[in-house]
Structure formats: structure tokens, C-alpha cells
Amino acid sequence: MTVRTGTDLDVLYPEVQNFYARHMQLLDGGNAEGWADTFTEDGSFYSPSMPEPARGREVITAGVRKAAAALAEAGEVHRHCMFMSYLKPRDDGSFYVRSYTQVIATPREGQPRLHMMCVCVDILVRQDGELKVRERRVTRDDRP
Amino acid sequence: MTVRTGTDLDVLYPEVQNFYARHMQLLDGGNAEGWADTFTEDGSFYSPSMPEPARGREVITAGVRKAAAALAEAGEVHRHCMFMSYLKPRDDGSFYVRSYTQVIATPREGQPRLHMMCVCVDILVRQDGELKVRERRVTRDDRP
Amino acid sequence: MTVRTGTDLDVLYPEVQNFYARHMQLLDGGNAEGWADTFTEDGSFYSPSMPEPARGREVITAGVRKAAAALAEAGEVHRHCMFMSYLKPRDDGSFYVRSYTQVIATPREGQPRLHMMCVCVDILVRQDGELKVRERRVTRDDRP
């Protein structure tokens, strides 16, 4: 498969969706290095669940490892369901994307539940042909 | 970014998805005029939550203002999560789109919940290059 | 509308999304033959909800009929909300797609609920120009 790149919406939008699908599946699968690699080296991550923003791949990797260990301990699986992505290229060549994200939590042998409803604002950039998250700002609907 | 238009599925489908993302984010953000502007001037909206169909931008604008005020009063955020869009162009140049839509409600400092599960059937048209909703028919799964 | 086919991600991804939308809407609408026709003649379906895999359109059709009758009896509507599709073509010309799927259940006059959270791994093939599911493997998050 060729991934054509460009700034036409019809070429870019499917690439962004496929990127996010892989990105979130890496996270939910506990693949800390794979997940961190979908950020730029100096990528930053602002989330109300974290006392301060995570900056850089090392910090992001450590955060996923910790979260994955806590989920394994709790016997829960989390799925980050991201959709409703509104994509808008910016003048500097980066891409603004504002999406809705549901976090679904399922305990072993239990009922799945909608754990969190979030809005995710990303700045994506292209590096060596691949999309990367340079900045992410997550807000939770329960803490407006 | 260039938004190429056309009737090829691969050009049209991403445009429709980006349109819906912006469309629903305007609604959930309480931007009544912005939301109404994504309908045609004479756009109509059939919903089981409304005693009669809304027709025209003025009525649609007033409806969103009222709903936004009620949500603010209740201290709740709603998110319209639309996906599974099945797109089919029609002979008259308009587009039939049938989608699933979850309405997620989150009270301040509370748990998010799946408030409503709906099916949304739209007729989209292109006006001055932009997609607009000419007709929307929403059905709720709890009132079949 | 022309459905251009090809192996470029930007052409393929929207086609796959439109295919899945129709595919799941056929299932949720109880259209057993229409649903079975979106599988190859010898298509197979592995699901933890079934004692053994379903193989072939006849078995798949019978399964949907049975499920639709049970839902009608229970007065419930189910919606299969599939998203986060990660698409990767394979060397043999088929397509690997790994998606998240929420099953939403809504009783008549009742509240909708997140019934099941699943991961769906498909092998899609193209036959006579149309996408078909050759193999599906579903796992439930509550039974890891």
C-alpha cells in the first residue's frame, strides 16, 4: 500500500484516522515504546489526569508503563475510542485536530463502562514522512 | 489545505466526516449561529425529541440556544458522537448519509453516561462549494 | 458516485469505512441475507459468543436470523459501533483491519447501555470489485 501524502483533505484525513487507530491501539495494548514513538522526540502531553504535563518520549514511555501496570493490577482493559476528528492544517505546515475521545473500561468478567468523556486537541507534524503528535491537550467533560 | 470536491467516494467521504466533526462540535459548543449555518437556509430537522420539525435557520438557531441554556442550567455537557456513516450519492446531486449517533451526557464532577442512541438520516447538498444539511431525520432506539 | 479502487491508503480507507457502515447497519437491521453477502462464500467468523466458528454464508445467515429473533423477543435494539480501524494491506492482496467495536443495547422505552466492548480483526478481500469479509476474529474485553 502506498501512503500518498499531501495537504489535500481527502489524502490527509484517512492517513490521520489510520494514524490515530494505530496510536490508540498501541496505548491500549500497553506498548509504551511504540506509543511514545508516535510523538515527536520533544512531544508534550497536557492532561487533567496528570499533575503536570509530560514532555519528551522518555516521560511519555514511563507514564504508559505505569498506567499499564495499574490496569493489569486492577484487572481492567481500557480502550481509547477517538472519533469526530475535525482537521485543519495550519500555516506552519502542522495540523490542528480536535477530536472526541471516550475511554471505555472493562473489568475481567464484568460490564464495560464509559469511564471518561474527553476532548483531545492535537498538533500533528510530519517527520520523515510519518505523522507524529507534537502537542496534545486533553480536557475531561466532568472537569470543565 | 485544498478540499477537493467531487463525486468519488474517496474524495467525498473524508470531506463528509470532517464536516460532521465540525458540525457536531459547533452544536456541543453551543455555537447556535455556526451550527445553523451548516444547514441550508430552508433546512429541516425531524427529531422525536421535538413536538414538530424545525424548519429554517432561525428556528434551528433558537432551538440550539434553548438547549444550550438548559444544559448550562443543569451543569451538563453533551457530546454528539456520530459514526458508522453510510454515504450514498443520489441522482439529483445530493448525498444520502445514514449514521449512528451516541449522545453522551456528563455532569460536572460526575460520571459520563450514554444518554441516547440514535440513527441519523441526512440529505446533504453542496452550496457555494460547502456541504450543508438540507434535511435530517433522527430516530431514537428507545422509541422504535 | 464512482468508487475508485486501489491500494493507496487514501482511496482504500474511506471505502473500508463505508463498507463497514453498510455492513453493520445490515446486521443491526436484521437483514440476514444482506449481511451474509458482505462475507465471502466461505467466510468464517470467530466469536467468543459462539461455541464454534461460523463458516459459510448459510451458517452466518442462520446466526443473524436467530439473533434478530431473540432481540425482537426481548424488545431490544442493538447497534454495532465500529471505529478506530487500523488498516494494513497484506502481501497476498487482502487487507488486515483491526477495529474497536462497541455493542450498544437499547430496550424499548428504556436507557441505552454499553453491552459489550470488543476488538474485531478482519481479513478483507476484493471480489468482483466489492469488499468482502473472508475472516473475522472477535474478542471481548471482559474475556481477555
Image: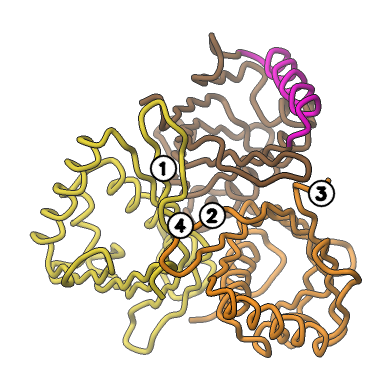
Chain colours: A yellow, B orange, C brown
State the separation of the CA atoms marked 3 and 1.
39 Å
Q: Which label belongs to residue A96?
A: none
Main SS class of the magenta portion in the image: helix
Q: As drawn, is B124 to the left or to the right of C124?
A: right
Q: Which label belongs to residue C88?
A: 1
- Secondary element under disc 2, as helix, strand or loop, is strand
Chain of the residue where label 4 is placed in the rendered structure? B
- Residue B47, x across and y down, in percent: 82, 64
Q: Are marks 3 and 1 on the same chain?
A: no
Q: Residues within 10 Å of mark 2 (few under 14, many from 20)?
A: many
- Secondary element under disc 4, as helix, strand or loop, is loop
Q: Is residue B126 magenta?
A: no
State the separation of the CA atoms marked 2 and 4.
6 Å
Disc 3 vs disc 1: Cβ atoms closer than 8 Å? no
Q: Residues within 10 Å of mark 1 (few under 14, many from 20)?
A: some
- Residue B119, x across and y down, in percent: 74, 53
Magenta stretch, residue numbers: C55-76
Q: Choose mark 1 or mark 4, whichever is in front.
A: 4
Q: Residue at x 50, y 30 (%)?
A: C123
Q: Is residue A31 visible?
A: yes
The image shows residue B19, relative to residue A84, as above or below, that is: below
Residue type pointed to by label 4? Gln
State the separation of the CA atoms marked 1 and 2.
33 Å
Identify the residue position indicated by label 3 in the image. B143
Identify the residue position indicated by label 4 in the image. B111
Q: Are marks 3 and 4 on the same chain?
A: yes
Q: Choose mark 3 or mark 4, whichever is in front.
A: 4
The image shows residue B119, relative to residue C38, as above or below, that is: below
- Residue A7, x across and y down, in percent: 44, 76
Residue type pointed to by label 3? Arg
Q: Which label belongs to residue B113?
A: 2
